[in-house]
Image (cartoon, rainbow, N blue to C red):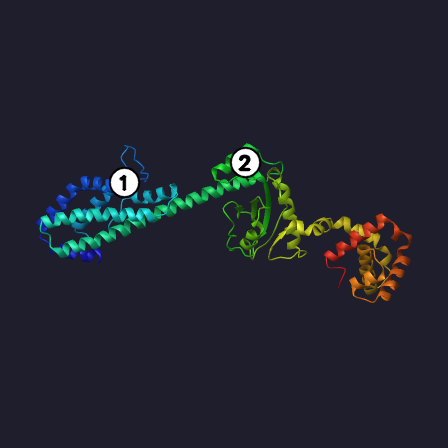
Amino acid sequence: MTQATVRSVWEEVPPSRMREFSARAQEEVPLLAQDILEAIRREYPGLSLAEDESGEPLALVGIRRALEHFLEHLTAESGAPLAYPRVFREFGRGEVLQGRSLDSLQAIYRLGVRLAWRRLAELGTEMRIPPPAMYALVESGFELIDGMVEESIRGYAEAAAHRAGERLRLQRRLLDLLLAKEGGDRSAIEDRAARIGWQVPRQVAVAVLVRPAREAVPPAVGGDVLLDMECERPRMVVPEPDAAGRWELLRRATAGWSGAIGPSVPLSEASKSLYWAQATVDLVERGLLPAGELLRCTAHTEALVLLPPEELIGDLGRRRLAPLRHCGPTQGRRLAQTLLAWLETRGGAPEVAQRLGVHPQTVRYRLRQIRELWGGEIDDPDSRFELELVLRTMRLRGELFG
């Protein structure tokens, strides 16, 4: 039943009787509001009630104003929608501050309207208000609840958004402190952590992510993981990364994202973990490491050590692989493959042949060529080490096998 229908039903009540009902009901408001508040306190004994500047419970103010507005609107001639006191928006904000949902608030509203209706029904009976008008009053009471809840939802959403924004701001400040190269002050870290309810861990690992798309939904990590989505490359600080099940949870949470997580380090060395995570992501973006998953830096140590110093390895490669310059591209690649297999296995022709998938006699022929090209240099430990570094780097870059 709409307010227009309620109003049309009440228009059938003699004006003098309707005015008298409204006046009597308005007189009842202060006592009725007090009775409703006491009933709420009995029903919800642990309920915390905020007070206004004068020390009066805001709940009592809200109940009283709601009843007054309701009765004024009922007898008003205009068809304007019912206005709800702003205090109900404050109630919604209060639920956020108390860490509660709106369920209990809605239950309180229903209790209050039920008690108000009971008293108004008694008054209507005394004053011989026709039953259809009183039934319409019930419908109007339901609309009142909906309006109060709507106002509270607005306040709840505003407060929740503000709290979330404030927490993100504090979280970013904590992240900046944790990831500072010189290491943040321990007491400052503990203070900022306490303000967002973050338990300071002994060990952390830092992850760096690559957005799959600008509008990508953030990874659904746990509340103990600090996530900063404001960076071009989002960052995560993961507490106690070696805890049982932690890696699996992270892997699932970051499904569809590319990125890397650095090694586990003491809290004061978080910037070191960040460094290796960033270095790994650099290689992912260059196509040298796989994308589409969260990589563990420690599983790609060889790539992290050999691939970044390109100029150094390039110069070393030109010097150590100089004997291959006079070989054709195909022959040179085959000899390089055979040389790396021999350096890695230090075995005979059968072992190298098995690794390369060729006949042992072919390997013997290639090894004779290698010894002719490099001579006694191939027996020098330092030379062998540098040759293996260069050839492993070529393999990582995809240059050794074509």
179 over 248 or under it: above or below: above
Residue at x-position 78% and y-position 65%: 357
First of labels 1, 2 by sequence position:
1
User: Which corner quadrant of the image does residue 348 belong to?
Assistant: bottom right
Residue 65 shows up from this direction: yes
Residue 191, image x, y percentages: 51, 34
For residue 342, what is the image quadrant? Answer: bottom right
How crowded pointer 2 is (Cα within 10 Å; few <14, some 14-19, many 20+) is rated as many
In the rendered structure, the answer to whether residue 42 lies left or right of residue 338 reads: left
Looking at the image, is 252 positioned above or below residue 105? below
Where's the N terminus, which quadrant? bottom left
Q: What residue type is labelled 2?
A: Ile
On residue 189, which mark appears?
A: 2
- In the displayed structure, 194 sits above or below 398; it is above
Residue pictured at 59% horizontal, 48% vertical:
207
From the top left corner, tell me how far across and down residue 321 is, in percent. Answer: 83, 55
Disc nearest the viewer among 1 and 2: 1
For disc 1, the marked residue is 41
Please state which of residues 323 and 30 is positioned toward the viewer in this rendering. Answer: 30
Q: Is disc 1 placed on a helix, strand or loop? A: helix
Q: In the image shown, does 339 or 5 lie closer to the viewer?
A: 339
Q: Nearer the viewer, residue 293 or 264?
A: 264
Left or right, residue 118 beside residue 358: left
x and y percentages locating residue 396 in the rendered image: 72, 56
How far apart marks 1 and 2 lie (CA) works out to 41 Å
Position of the C terminus by quadrant: bottom right
Q: Which amino acid does label 1 sit on?
A: Arg
Residue 80 seen by the camera: no
* 228 to the left or right of 322: left
Secondary structure, mark 2, is helix
Instruction: Report the side of 368 relative to 351 (left or right).
Output: right
Residue at the image position 18 percent from the left and 39 percent from the top: 31
